[in-house]
Image: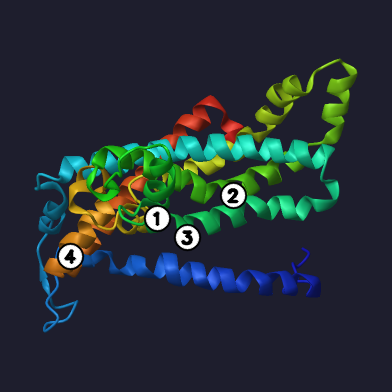
Amino acid sequence: MKKNHIRKSDLALLGMLLPGSIYLLINNYAPMGGLFIAFKRINFKKGIFRSDWVGLSNFEFLFKTKEAWVMTRNTLLYNLVFIALNIILGVTFAILLNEIRNKVLKKSYQTILLMPQIISMVIVSYMAFAFLSSDNGFINLTILKNLGRDKISWYSKAGYWPFIIVFVQAWKNIGYNTILFLASVVGIDPSLYDAAMVDGASRIRQIFYITLPLMRPAMITLGLLMVGKIFYSDFGLFYQLPMNSGPLFGVTQTIDTYVYRGLSNVSNLGMASAASFYQSFVGFAVVLASNLVVRRIDPDSALF
């Protein structure tokens, strides 16, 4: 039998893999050893291991409250909208940028790749209070004033915030998602388009019958990864962007922000662990269920 030997050329690749693997183990797998904290009432005098077991009482923090339905509804509905928009906008801009690359800016391909991400990072980091401040915000002082409209107290009007949150989230992620899908688009064999042109297919037909079908695995993979985080929320988006404004809790309260607000007063480590455990377990179950559905419809596109 031939023995398998690691070649010297492979050592460099393994070395490149090592830092990421160590980070993954420390950040994602090592904390799983502390899952038992979710079933304890932590007493720092006794220590973590000697603290009393309380069973499922920590999970009651999430469910036995009048805000339980609101935060669960907001978390799920916002994430469903985010998943749909991230995929649709990412695919759309990836195809548009690929068309521009092919026709106009072949020499500036790297700039095209980086442009959406740069724009989204700059706008999102600057947008929140500078745009929406009731007294000095750009929208009130410039847009509404020139239109002859009264100022809007953005941080006390809950009706505007579902649209604001969806817009900011889409803008913040459009660059990253575009780059992911653009990598899928540029990997398509050009001979397929050449054959379609010979058969008389227009560019629109090429997109619908070649580009989109071949991008389907990437869309499904990214969708499944997003579904795994469907019970999580962007803390900055739902807490910092609305400035933790009380009148907006009905449309900005999610599981993460509720737990943070509750624990900032209670400081119960067990409750925080229970919330994290619940989110991880449900996310894992949703990924398994979603992958099962995908595997039954299109086995080649399933993750496992």
Is residue 291 visible to us here? Answer: no
Type of the residue with mark 1: Ala
Query: Which of 67 and 115 lies nearest the eye of the viewer?
Result: 115
Camera-side mark, 4 or 3: 3
Indicate which disc residue 263 carries.
Answer: 4
Q: Compute the Cα span from label 1 to label 3.
A: 7 Å
Q: Earlier in the sequence, mark 4 or mark 1?
A: 1
Q: Nearer the viewer, residue 215 or 22?
A: 215
For marks 3 and 2 on the same chain, the one whose residue lies earlier in the sequence: 3
Amino acid type assigned to the residue bearing label 4 in the image: Leu
* Extreme-bottom residue of the structure: 45
Q: Which residue is mark 2?
A: 175
Which residue is identified by label 3? 125
- Label tally: 4
- Mark 3 packing: few (<14 Cα in 10 Å), some, or many (20+)? few
Which numbered dot is residue 128? 1
